[in-house]
Structures are given as structure tokens and as C-alpha cells.
Amino acid sequence: MTVYQQIDSNKFRTLLLTVLFIVLVGAFVEILVLGMGGDPWAGVVVLLAVAAYALFSYRFSDAIVLRISGAKEVKHDENPDLYHIVENLCIGAGLPMPKVYLIEDSAPNAFATGRDPEHATVVVTSGLLQKLERLELEGVIAHELSHIKSYDIRLMSLAVLLVGIVALLADLFFRYTWYGAGARPSNRRRGGGGGGAILLIIALIAAIIAPIAAQFIRFAISRRRESLADASAALLTRYPEGLARALEKISADKEPLEVANKATAHLFIVNPLHEHQSWLNNLFSTHPPVEERIAALRAM
């Protein structure tokens, strides 16, 4: 399979997973509403409310991430070398110049965030600038610009929001069934007797399974986008070895990234939490194993 075929395959599978994700959230909301004895149209109202909440959160998600990460904007005169690397790669990729931010931390890493190429930000740590050679740094920046160009920054923001919404709805439903359903038996009777009980059982099962399924879809989307960004970065720089060496250095560095947490770890080019490698951790990781990514780059 060529690089271009891999990119097309990843795009199609990501689109399929994203549609599946949205369908999952919609079906989950409807099942919960019916399980609580509500009108089917109430599910539509709840879904619209969820969409409004997601839109509001998505609009300000990049600012929240930058604040959590302690990132500060870098102007041209403050670091012209970094600025010129980003600028030159943007010209090659046909992208507008994103904002450039810096995290003062000796652990090497980077990520991109924003809503679209016109409202995007590339973030690097001071450790990345200190520990990578120029060609390696170009590979990392090209990877993050690839996320911007393919709208991964929008997709992953929405994926995180949807996972959070599913988890929140499941928690609210469990609280309702634990504290509220028993206190209102008349609601159950209005739900149709045995039929209402069956719907309640289905809703309970959905509340258990849906958050797990949502996480798996999010992991699958994220892994696909990381592999696609690696391939796109290699095409942009015409030097896959630069990114391969950068991934080796970043993954081998044992210094913890102090500002990283589970909410933001999926954004970084390499998972900054340094989890112990095992088949279970790899199964639940938002990143493909670094060894696989490096091997794929060196096979190009």
C-alpha cells in the first residue's frame, strides 16, 4: 500500500467511525429518555440541548487547553528560528500561519489545537527545542500542521466532547434510577408496565456499554489520525527519517511533562504520561505504538 493509498484509507475509516460515533450518541440519548418513561420527542429536545452544549464547549476548547497547559504565545522576535520553521512549512502545506505557543518544560513534546486552519495553534515545549535537531523539529512541526490541514484538531475536540457527554448522560441516568425511579412508581406504570420495565433494562445496559463503546471509537479515530499525520508530515518534509528520529528521542526521554493530564494527553505527538507498555495499555491508548510509527516512516 502506497502512502497516498494509506491516507485515503485512513480518511474513509475515520469518516466511518465519526458517523458511527454520532449515531451512537443519538441512539444512546433516545434509549435513556425512553427508559425513563419520557416521550420519544423529548429525546430530540435533549439531543438538541446536548448539541448546543457541545458547540459552546467546542468554541472555547482551544483556549481552555492552552490555559491548562500553561502555554504562552511566542512572537517572531522572541524565537525567529522556530517561527521561520513553522512559516516555511505552512507555505509548503498551503496553510495560513497558525499562532505559535511555548510550554516552559524540559520534556520534549508538541501538539496542535484550534477549530480550523484559520484558528489554529501549534504548541511546543522548550525541551523539544533544546533536544531536537532542526530536521527532527521540522518533522514534528510538519506532523502538527498535518493535523491542522486535515481538520484533526476539530475532529478530536468533538470526539472528546462526545465521550464526555456520553459519560455525563450515563452518570445522570444512574443517579435517576437510583434516587428517582423508585420514588415515582407511577411513571413506570405510565411507561407501559412490562414494556416500560424492558425499556428501563435496555437503558441500563446502554448506560453501561455506551461510555465504553464511545471510548473505543475515540481511540480508533485518534490512532488513525496519528498514522495519517505521520504519513502527511513525511510527504511535506520529504524526509521521513527526521520525524522517525524525533519520535525515538521524544519517546525515550523519561522526564515527565508536568502540565500533562489524561484530558490533554491525546493531543500530544507522543503520549506524555509514560504509561508502562503492555497489551492492555496499547489497547486503550490514543496513540499507535511508537515503534510501529517509526517502522512505518522508515518503510516509506
Image (cartoon, helix red, strand yellow):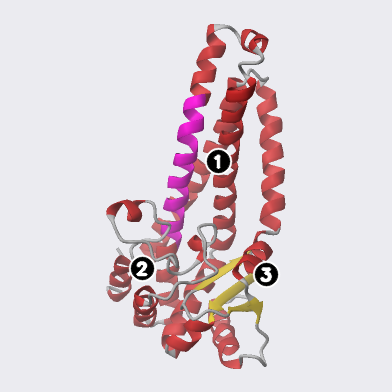
The x, y position of residue 197, in whole percent, is 53, 13
Measure the C-alpha gap from mark 3 to mark 1.
31 Å
User: Chief secondary structure of the magenta span?
Assistant: helix
Q: Is residue 1 left or right of residue 243?
A: left
Query: Eyeballing the image, is 208 above or below 97?
Result: above
Residue on which disc 3 sits: 118
Residue on which disc 1 sits: 167
Q: Is residue 16 visible?
A: no
The x, y position of residue 156, in whole percent, is 54, 57
Number of the front mark, 2 or 3? 3
Query: Eyeballing the image, is 57 above or below 295?
Result: above
The x, y position of residue 100, in whole percent, is 62, 79
Q: Earlier in the sequence, mark 2 or mark 3?
A: 2
Q: Quadrant of residue 153?
A: bottom right
Disc 1 marks which amino acid?
Ala
Tell me the magenta residue range: 204-225
Q: Could you say which disc has been placed on residue 3 in the image? A: 2
